Amino acid sequence: MLKKPYLILITLLLTMPLTACGGGGETPDPTTATTSRLDTIKQRGTLICGVNGEVPGFSFVDENGQYSGLDVDICRAIAAALFDDPEKVEYRKLSAQERFPAVQSGEVDVLNRNTTWTISRDTTNGMEFAPTVFYDGQGIMVTTASGVADMEGLAGKSICVLAGTTTEQNLADQMRKRGIEDYNPVTFEDVDALYAAYQEGRCEGVTADRSQLVARRSILPNRNDHAILNVVLSKEPLGPAVKNNDSAWFDAVKWITFSLIQAEELGINSQNIATFETSEDPNVRRFLGLDDKLGEGMGLPNDFAARVVKHVGNYGEVYERNIGEPLGLDRGPNNLWTEGGLLYSPPFR
């Protein structure tokens, strides 16, 4: 009879998983757990960027297929940092309903589509939001012929609103808050259809981010026949977003975006960047990749920020080119923190 210690040993051996002789589970593929979207993009050689394509000043495609706008320049900045070429971008026009599934499925690498950062989008929608590049608020535009001067004047009126957006919920919340129940929200899936319906008189008012209203008003046939009410319905922090749970790619997008802001704070722009290459300021030298290896630490070239400024400019240049000059919008909260605004970059060190 075997002694008790031997019986215990035999039992343990018989119950161990049979992995050494091909009887166990499959060996996991290490690349599936470690490959970041950043690696995929660098191997592909182009960035796939989801945009709106229908909002002047932010992302707009002209009759020649050329994209322009603040959101577009964020895409170009990422491509510049990665490839030293801001044109290595493939743009995908996405509707409000298509944008999040496109990120989650991997159809696009990054979303730059005047998208508001909210708690539900950051959590249950599986998104990761990079720094805010435009602080906005929702507004309402009406025809001057309607005689509407405030929110209360919209009682009994029709209001065009884009379906599946924060504007739809914000409108309902504000009307409920004011006790206005007899208004008629008319929803649309497409931005162009939304404003076409407003132009045709199917709605007395249209609601969207105030910047978007200013942009669309600028291309209406008779812009002076339309007025933007002096009301702000919400906070709308807009910025790029990527898929959750990929810290390497998120870090890259985050710090590339911050480089636009930090460049303006340092006084570096696309016209004078060459003069800073001999600077003895350690902050400037780190930022331009002349000292230390800040880029290498996250899978980017050490001069990634210099590439961004050289090809795209700093945030102030991007703002003025796309919004300030063509639309006449003051920067307001989109000024640097040193100028009383909300734009602030953590240190590059």
Image (cartoon, rainbow, N blue to C red):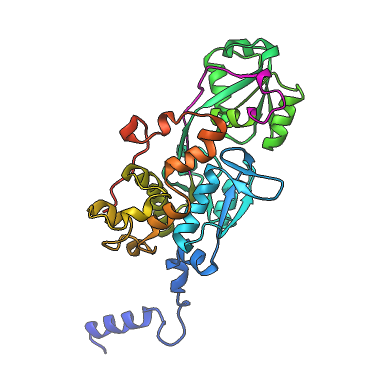
Q: Quadrant of residue 28?
A: bottom left
177 relative to 287 in the view: left or right: right
Q: Is residue 317 above or below residue 187?
A: below
Look at the image and tell me in which quarter the N terminus lies: bottom left
326 relative to 3 in the view: left or right: right
From the top left corner, tell me how far across and down residue 325 is, in percent: 53, 34
Residue 132 in view (yes/no)? no
What residue sits 31% from the left and 57% below the top? 277
From the top left corner, tell me how far across and down residue 213 is, in percent: 60, 28
Segment tinted magenta in the rendering? 217-239
Q: Quadrant of residue 266?
A: top left
Look at the image and tell me in which quarter the C terminus lies: bottom left
Of residues 33 and 128, the one nearer the viewer is: 128
From the top left corner, tell me how far across and down residue 220 is, in percent: 69, 28
From the top left corner, tell me how far across and down residue 346 is, in percent: 30, 46
Q: Is residue 328 magenta?
A: no
